[in-house]
Image (cartoon, helix red, strand yellow):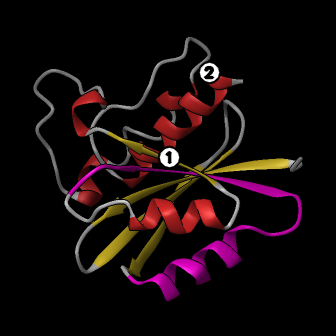
Amino acid sequence: MADRITYVGLDVHKEGIVVAVAAGGLRGEVREYGRIANTSTALDRLLRKLGGDGVSLRFCYEAGPCGYGIQRQVSATGHECVVVAPSLIPRRAGDRIKTDRRCQPGQAAPGRRADGGVGSGRSARGDARYGAGTARRRT
C-alpha cells in the first residue's frame, strides 16, 4: 500500500489535457499542474513524474467524446481512475463559467470536505476534488 495519495483531475480535450493535482488529506494543497498533449506518450510521462516511490495516484475525469482510452491506460499501470458523468457533478445555481482557468479555483477543496461534499463546476481541479471525495467515501 502506498504511503501517500495524490488526486489528479483531468480536463480532457481533443488536442490536450489540463491537469490539476490535489495532495491527499482534508487540507492538502490543490494546484494546476499544467497542460499536456492528448497522447499516450505524454500521459505515460505524466504517470512517471507524479507516481514516485510510495505515492498512490487516483485519477478522475469527466466523461466526454474522447472515450475511455485514458481510463484504460491509467488503470493498466495500476492506478485508480474514475470517469464521472457530467450530469452528476454538482454545480452552484447560476454558475455558468465553463472555461478551464476561471472555473478551477472553486473546485478542488470541497471534494475532501469532512461532510462528504463534492466540488462544483467542471474542470481538472474540480475532478481532482471529486476524486478525493469519492475515494474517501469508498474506504
Q: Name the residue located 47 percent from the left edge and 82 percent from the top edge.
A: 40
Quadrant of residue 127 within the rendered picture: top left
Task: Tally the marks.
Answer: 2
Q: Is residue 129 magenta?
A: no
**Residue bearing the label numbered 1:** 128
Please indicate whether residue 91 sits to the left or right of residue 18 in the image: left
Residue contact at pointers 1 and 2, CB within 8 angstroms: no
* Disc on res. 112: none
In the picture, measured across the screen, residue 80 lies left or right of residue 18, that is: right
Lateral position of residue 24 relative to residue 14, left or right:
right
Q: At numbered mark 1, what does the secondary structure look like: helix, strand or loop?
A: helix
The percent coordinates of residue 88 (x first, y second) are 29, 28
Callout 2 amino acid: Arg
* Label placed on residue 137: 2
Mark 1 residue type: Ala
Q: Residue 69: x and y, percent?
A: 40, 67
